[in-house]
Image: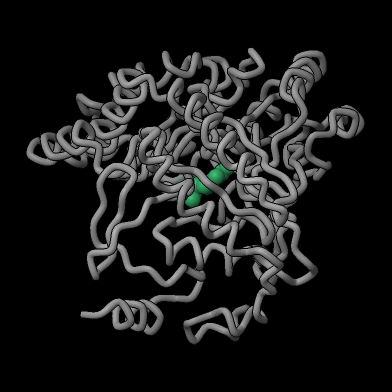
Amino acid sequence: MTAKKYIELEQTYGAHNYHPLPVVISKAKGVWVWDVDGKKYMDMLSSYSAINQGHLHPRIVKAAKEQMERVSLTSRAFSNDRMGPFLKKLCEISGMEMALPMNTGAEAVETAIKLARRWGHQNKGIPENEGEIVVCENNFHGRTTTIISFSSDQDSKKGFGPFTPGFITIPYNNVAAFEKAITPNTIGILVEPIQGEAGINVPSPGYLKELRRICTEKGVLLILDEIQTGFARTGKMFAFEHEGIKPDVLCVGKALGGGLYPVSAALSSREHFSVFTPGSHGSTFGGNPLACAIADAALDVLIDENIAERSATMGAYFVKKLRAMNCSEIKEIRFKGLLIGVEFKLGPGETVRPICQKLMESGVLAKDTHEKTIRFAPPLTITEEEADWALERIRKVFEGLGKRIPSPPAAAQCTCPCQAMR
Ligand SMILES: *Cc1c(COP(=O)(O)O)cnc(C)c1O
């Protein structure tokens, strides 16, 4: 079947809730993917940082295969021999005391919200239904009805109401706004250490430290969503390590599954987790032995291959080379480790999609995050040689931009019949 046919099938039978670049991937290894015609590309998105260990890391694949021959699913009605050892490892790596395993990132965030709310009610004496969780403008925490309730992105919420109350929005990277937002009913703040989906928004140094100080002073929870920033993406195992702090509640997902399987968790202290009693929360697939075996191996790879260090070194290398290109169309480069955002000078209504399209044609798969920023977030296993391969192609595309390439109207960019959606 041709690429065109696969895309047609996807668009005929699949809901148009995404607007993919027109590449049909059928094979992957490490930082590389191949399309149905055998053309090779470098994956510079890593499935939004779910593939930090590289595609199909042999050690993670081996763990998965072995576990599939033993037992895959037990449900939490019974214990299994993979969950305990895995959770111990996850807690030791993150410096947290306990974990509650789920599947997707959104479920980890939901778990954190439930934990926080019940803790606020039971331990802080906040009247039931009156607790407030502070969140930041331009956040991205997932797609459930509750989570989109506190999104500031109209595309992801319009028409999906009524929304869950109990969330107070403040500007990101604004410590004073947080202090001002705290009331006797405040449970805590839910925040991303770097806003990935908002365009790789890196806050000022000391931001998390200040949030930590205020949370401790006021007795409210610091809830960090490290679903995208966690597991070495930013050059440390967790982004909070850059500021030498610890959150009260931590949400992880994405790379925890090593790119093979959805695995997520909410982590916190033993004391906070005491609000969960049997029957109060759960998931059929959460903590299943296959997920735990895969995640256990995914963590081993991160540690044994010094992936955090590599992420820091390669991130600095990549950005140095990007900056040396002196591309006049670039407005700003923001990064930490291998989470890199390149913002372009574009006019109103223009997006970086045509640049992503050109990059794709040259063999580099990257996607916009927000209209004006391209995210470069390759697997953290990337070598200097592989980075150079991509940088050479990126340079040619950037040079070719010369004068501004105007984006065609949004509908015309779309190769699929989903114009109505845009
Ligand atoms: C991807 C992401 C989520 C949601 O994870 P899913 O697995 O897609 O539900 C939540 N928070 C952040 C910061 C993310 O990047």
Locate residue 15 relative to residue 127 in the image: left or right.
left
Image: 52 above or below 216: below
Q: What residue appears at the point 44 percent right and 30 percent down from the top-left corner?
A: 100
Q: Residue furthest left?
A: 69
Tell me which residue sits at (85%, 28%) in the image: 175
Locate the C terminus and report the quarter of the image it occupies: bottom right
Q: Residue at x 69, y 74 (%)?
A: 406
Across and down, in percent, residue 187 comes to 74, 30
Q: On screen, 80 above or below 333?
A: above
Quadrant including the N terminus: bottom left
The front one of 108 and 114 is 108
Q: From this viewpoint, is residue 84 visible?
A: no
Viewer can see residue 373: yes
Identify which residue, 387 or 231, lies in the foreground: 387
Q: How many marks?
A: 0
Choose top left, top right, bottom left or bottom right for residue 409. bottom right
Residue 393 horizontal/vertical position (percent): 46, 54
Whole-percent x, y for residue 132 in the image:
77, 38
